Image (cartoon, rainbow, N blue to C red):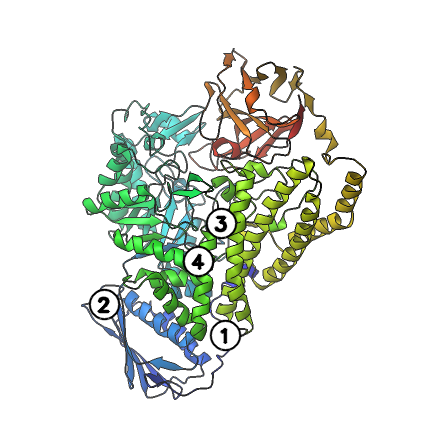
Amino acid sequence: MQNILESVSGSPSAPFIRSAGKLPVDSVDLSCGVCILDAFPDPEKLLDTAYDDLARTLARWKVSQSGAFSISTELDRALESEEFILETTPEACRIYAAGCEGIRRGLYELSGSLSRANAPFLKIGQIRREFFIKDRISRSFFAPIHRPPFNKDELLDDIDYYPEAFLNRLAQEGINRLWLTVEFHEVTCSSIQALEPETPRRLQKLRGIVEKCRRYGIRVYLFCLEPAGFFGESELASKYPELLGVDCSYSMHAFCPDSPLAQQHLFEQTFYLFSEVSHLAGLINIPAGEALASCFSSCGSPCQAPAPFRCPRCGSLQPWQALNRSLEPMIRGMRAANPEAVFHCWLYQPSGGASLHAWVEDCARHLPDGASLIYNFESGISVKQQGRTRTGGDYWQSKTGPSPRFLRMAELRHEVGGTFGAKLQVCNAFEVSTVPNLPVPGILFRKYRILKQTGTRIALYGWYFGTSPGFMHRFALRLASADFKKGERAFLLEAARAEWGTDAEKVAAAWALFARGYACYPVNDGIQYDGPFHHGIAWPLLIEAELRDLFPVWQPARISGDSIGACLAEFPLADAEKQCRKMAQLWNHGLELFLPLKNKYWNYPERLEDIRMAEAAGLLLTSGWRILRFYLLRRRMYGGRFSALDEMEEIVRQEVCSSRRMIALCREDARLGYQSEAQVHKFDPALLRCRIDQLNGLLKNGIPNLRVRLLKGGKPLYANAVRQSCCRADGSNHQQKTFCWSIRRVLEGLRIRFQCRLLLGNDQVSDLVYIILADRLCSEFPILIRCTKTGTSNSKRTFSPKDCSLFQDDHSWGMDLVVPVTLIRDNPVAFNIQRQYMQVEQGSRKVSSTSTYAAMMECQFGNATQIDSWSPEAAPVALSPYIHPAGWGLLQL
């Protein structure tokens, strides 16, 4: 943690190096000293941190603060609250604003100009800034996320996740809002819900965070998923059954807000919270899509008709009415305690196509007074790649967007005069989440131009990742006040000149290549979540099949293996390799322009950081492409083209060099490799050294030994002999801890039968069986059959057999189905069958919390294994279009 803090500690304290040269005719020299006159009214001294930042910048130029040239701050009530005018003459520099935050922005503008200059020269003239993005919202990217598996609450420890230098850097880069995660039952109370013992401690730390951030012009939002639904037994719901809403099966109930008691409860919760913590900015609430919440959260896909509310109270309501039933009392309670607080409703709908169903549009039209709407910028984008149109979910930094859904929501909010915001990723996203800043300003320029056109006023910069300080924050601040009269190239050149001076043309050309390359990232959420581009540089390479699983980057799981097809979804491996090769090549062309600047800027930490980020991203993109290429070649080798081993060997050599280079970069910046949602480093020097040892072992022994075997007429094998003899399709019964299964070859395909013992009690929340069949190397996306007590589901990424029968008795349930022979790719095939169910985590309270349950995966190769998760359906196989079988095996047909 300390190393990460040092990596974001703001500007260095070393003096600037003055370059030779005369004073330009349009500039004033400050080297003879200045006098700072803080005439702007600031009774709370909120601007002291900005004055201090300017003083530090002057000190680094060794400029005395007792000179004749004056720098003054003055009140101008005609300006907007954050608008400022910075006016410089040969005698003085004046900053005019109507509010403290306008003065702050002017002081940081002045400090930044001096930091970027080659000498303590200040350009004569006037700068005027007015920001159309009013709320620029980020978070402390290394603060806990308050979710499993660690369940760490930043309000209950003694760590300072908001050190002064970090906040100063955020403020310099234009961040004026931060959010942190809370659960209402932990920080609030009501007449029906008592105060928890730790609540006072949490609120005390929260007050300190709010006041500390406020000194830097940063206000704090609380992020929540409220009102939270009920999982299993709940003391509150047992005592007040009118709070139980839609029965979601498996001991899950939504919270029903449609009763006087529920309305009172929600009002009192927010009133208490905002009464206890002064100066909170407000709430950012996801009412559906992220976890079980109110009855509204059961509506379903935004592109389809809503599921009916199976609730005795609000069942007759329209979706927008059910939504407002929960929002209105929360807003009233918040505003009663703090009239200036703001409520952002983040309607999180990542899945689905381009169009919206009418019920979603109604929600946008009818949001209650006092609520702003935030919507995902890219969710539902369509991009043509490798001859097919592909639709993306959320977290797409690499794609300009926006989706038609975003534009429609913006239009609707404009029609009703409501405030509108965009959830987008500024610094990084789920394409490459382990490099804190990816320098693709051209893509961000296009996004912000659309934000301006659509009247968007709020920008939510990221999720748990995508919020680390750096160049993309600085560029986003430029965009937040841009009029976009200049084209993209001119704007990029202007930004490059401000930071890179005479090298602007070269830097802007590199940025353009980075953007072109990154835009080639495959539109495939499996590759995003499980693919090699986050930490493939730490993965082993396996020349003979071991069928090791892939693991999601957003969980602190083990290093992934060789089942590369598990992340490909609708992308054939050959197409993915081709697409990613183009991406890596274009990025590396940009690095050819960018990396040589390192020698020139050896004494400029911000420039070196920018170069380091671009190089690290290039290493990951290239390594990810090589991994796809490696397993494509391995498939050819297993098919008899043994010459593919030569190129595989060369890839191993190249990857040794890449891992070594990444070790050096990690030592320079501890943020590299850190994944903010997983809350661990997905690669670091130790993991990279382990990988280098594994690759060197291949070069020394593995590849030569395999080559000798092939020359003698042998074949590549499966490295794990145990899995190789797992089972035959002969109808034998296989007994697991809570279920049994059999599989046999029939004329029409494979007949699979399983039977699950019923799990009793409230601990059972979810019960799913997955049958997974893949090619014998797991090089393509598998056939995935999702089985429940009501049948199998059919979607783009799951298969529903026609020949299928269900059975159930008092003690068990099961299914008998046939997989058609046309879907069987190989003999043998990679096979897995697993049962998922949910259990209450040991020691947890049975309350309406998103962290109460953990998934249990029981599969063909072992007994129940806990998979940490954050909601009843969040085990990887449950929601994902990609799969994580707990160990593949070979099925001999």
Say if mark 2 contacts mark 3, CB within 8 Å.
no
Instruction: Give the alpha-carbon distance from disc 1 to disc 3, as whole Å.
Output: 29 Å
Tag 4 or tag 2, which sits nearer the N-term? 2
Instruction: Give the alpha-carbon distance from disc 2 to disc 1, as whole Å.
Output: 32 Å
Q: Which mark is residue 208?
A: none
Q: How would you rate the neighbour count of disc 1 (Cα within 10 Å): few for under 14, some for 14-19, many for 20 or more?
A: few
Above or below 723: residue 33: below
Instruction: Give the alpha-carbon distance from disc 2 to disc 4, as whole Å.
Output: 34 Å
Q: Which mark is residue 13?
A: 1
Disc number lying in front (4 or 1): 4
Q: Is residue 149 visible?
A: no
Instruction: Give, as a three-letter code, the residue at label 4.
Output: Val
Instruction: Give, as a three-letter code, the residue at label 1.
Output: Ser
Q: Nearer the viewer, residue 52 or 494?
A: 494
The residue labelled by disc 2 is: 98
Q: Position of residue 620 (x, y in %)?
A: 56, 53
Q: Which mark is residue 144?
A: 3
> Quick one: SS at disc 2?
loop
Tag 3 or tag 2, which sits nearer the N-term? 2
Q: Nearer the viewer, residue 692 or 769?
A: 692
Tag 1 or tag 4, which sits nearer the N-term? 1
Give the left or right position of residue 576, taking residue 185 as reference.
right
Tag 1 or tag 2, which sits nearer the N-term? 1
Tag 3 or tag 1, which sits nearer the N-term? 1
